[in-house]
Amino acid sequence: MKSIKSATFDGIVDAIEVDVEGSFTKGLPSFSIGGLVTTAIQESRDRVKSALLTNDYKFPPKKVIVNLSPSDIHKTGSHFDLSVALLIALYEEKVDFKGFYIFGELGLDGELKDTKSIFPLILSLANQVKNLKVIVPISSAQKVAMIPNVKVYALKNLSESMEFFKFQNYEAKRVQNRTLEYKHFTFDKRSYFYLDKYPLDFKDVKGQKLAKYAALISASGNHNVLYEGSPGCGKSMIIKRLQYIMPPMDMEAILEKAKLDSLEAKEPTFEPRRVFRNPHHSSTRASIFGGGSVNSKIGEVALANNGILFFDELPHFSKAILEALREPLEDHSILISRVNSKVNYSTKFLFATALNPCPCGNLLSATRECRCSQMEVKRYKNKLSDPLLDRIDMFITMNDSSFDDKSDVDSASMHELVLKTFKMQLQRGQSCLNGKLNDDEIEKFCVLDSPSNDVLNQAVVNFSLSFRSINKVLKVSRTIADLDGSLNIQKKHLLKALNYRKR
């Protein structure tokens, strides 16, 4: 009995090895596939038969049983076609499949096709298997070749695949690993890539100097931020430009982004630009957090990992969604539990949100009259609980825009400052940006001198700051000190950070 290595997803994003086994026995000719497989895999029987017959290969007149082991794991995807076809076509040949993981969907004519699951599966396997060797369709090769330390062999069709193993002409089909050709710098043998193009530029934002400085702090330290102001003052305009000044990405983060793109049926670009997710307030809870009646599906909070999750008009989101945000914002991970799967995925995103001060939006306006009653304003604000707001680092109240406002900064200069602060955080030995530091890391990297410590103690008494709020203030002040080029947090940095606390 021969077997071929492949893989399937165990949950959402983790791959598990699968042995595609074939048995050929005497009996009434038949062809079956087992191993807790989906309809897409069962249908591969017809694709495999057609591909073999179209390419002048006879289907063996035997009882053919293909099993995908382990049989107690639910298996999905049409990428098993090539493995099944090779087992059948070469069952009488003395070939060695050992060491190769094989992926590819078959067309009826034997042509190999890419699927959305091939790239994320191989990326996950690369973290589990040393010296991974994979056989993929030519259409998948350029994507898979971006994964470091993986030997990629690209094949065009079933006939070429059979010749590959018969004649063992491996190197002729080897695809060289690709490297990113973007601006980057290297620190501690790791490269960090970034783009210096700004389709949405902060130079388009007139006035709002303090709000733009808050955006700079938020991007530099990955701090959650909330903008409040009248309609048209520039809240969404500022947040939508955050994506283009975010810190650089290492290869691991770029591949993770490409993996999530593939799972969402998007073609990965491998651009070092952090993702920006902007779900509508009418989105369901399952679409935001992931879920499904049987198998877990990925949601917006997971797709926003290492990027930005933007909730516009925050109070219009359902109460259930807002309260469920507390766990991913605090723990930077979320567990989706279903009958057949339990999946934990990372949620280290920058949470940016905007809201009006009242239902009509004119409460803070100097030129327009507010039409809301005191009860309506209170009901509107009560949609946001204190535990949720306590997980936001910075609160900015924006004034109305004026015709005389001028542009005082552009995205290029802001991005340059973000890069500088990012390098400072690397040099301190941080494993993440300031906004995502844990308690031990805060104690290590956010050290206050005596005057600053006195100010913080006074603020705790005067403003009744919670332990979480204190940590938020410390992390924001650490980023402000970085922007100032200061090795230590000074009193002026702490005072600025206190101005951004929840009032």
Image (spheres, rainbow, N blue to C red):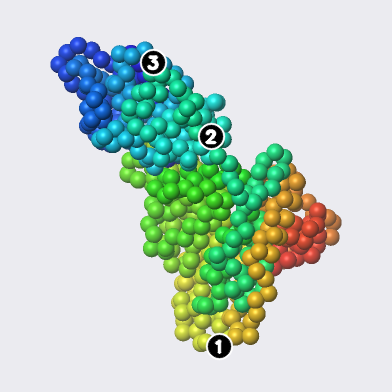
Mark found first going from the N terminus, 3 or 1 = 3
Q: Residues within 10 Å of mark 2 (few under 14, many from 20)?
A: some
Q: Nearer the viewer, residue 176 or 151?
A: 176
Q: Residue at x 80, y 62 (%)?
A: 491
Q: Residue furthest left?
A: 28
**What SS does tag 2 mark?**
loop
Q: Is residue 385 left or right of residue 190?
A: left
Identify the residue position indicated by label 2 in the image.
176
Q: Nearer the viewer, residue 436 or 501?
A: 436
Identify the residue position indicated by label 3 in the image.
95
Residue 367, numbered circle: 1
**What SS does tag 3 mark?**
loop
Q: Identify the amino acid type marked 1.
A: Thr
Q: Residue at x 37, y 40 (%)?
A: 115
Mark found first going from the N terminus, 1 or 2 = 2
Q: What x and y, as percent, mark residue 467?
A: 66, 54
Mark found first going from the N terminus, 2 or 3 = 3
Query: In the image, which is nearer the foreground, mark 3 or mark 1?
Result: 3
| Residue 473 vertical position relative to residue 356 in the rendered view, above or below | above
